[in-house]
Amino acid sequence: MSTKPRACTTGSKLLLRKLWITFWENATRAKVLEEFQKHNEEMTALLGKGYAKGTLDRFTITINHVIPFIRLKFNAEDVEFSDFFSAASSHFNSSFC
């Protein structure tokens, strides 16, 4: 059994990479929390139409973890994905893995 926290799993690293690729390709100036909010509003409208409440709950939990990370690392209310990805990558690679 692994002693690494769940944040170090391959799936978590792949999710972080997927988020980076998605938003880097679409809008390099996109802000993390702004995009999460838009996404969650869209998902709320689609509940029962292909999206389950549990999926929305997991995104809500994620944003509730991302908010204090941004405040701690950047002393800001929101940051661009390019800055977030850089900080999150080094944080997860050095702090947890």
Image (cartoon, rainbow, N blue to C red):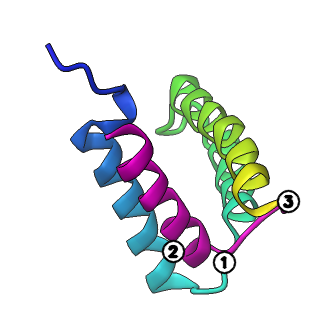
Query: Sequence order check: which comes first, mark 3 or mark 1?
Result: 1
Position of 64 with respect to 1 (left or right) is right
**Prevailing SS of the magenta stretch:** helix
Q: Is residue 58 above or below residue 69?
A: above
Which residue is under mark 3?
77
Which image quadrant for residue 39?
Answer: bottom right
- Mark 2 closeness class: few <14, some 14–19, many ≥20 residues within 10 Å: some
Which residue is under mark 2?
23
Question: Looking at this view, is 72 or 21 the one in front?
Answer: 72
Q: Amino acid at mark 2?
A: Phe
Position of 89 with respect to 70 (left or right) is left
Residue positioned 65% across, 46% down in the render? 66
Label 3 to label 1: alpha-carbon separation: 14 Å
Question: Looking at this view, is 48 or 17 the one in front?
Answer: 17
Q: Amino acid at mark 1?
A: Ala
The span shown in magenta is 76-97
Dot 1 and dot 2 residues touching (CB under 8 Å):
yes
Label 2 to label 3: alpha-carbon separation: 19 Å
Q: Amino acid at mark 3?
A: Glu
Which residue is under mark 1?
30
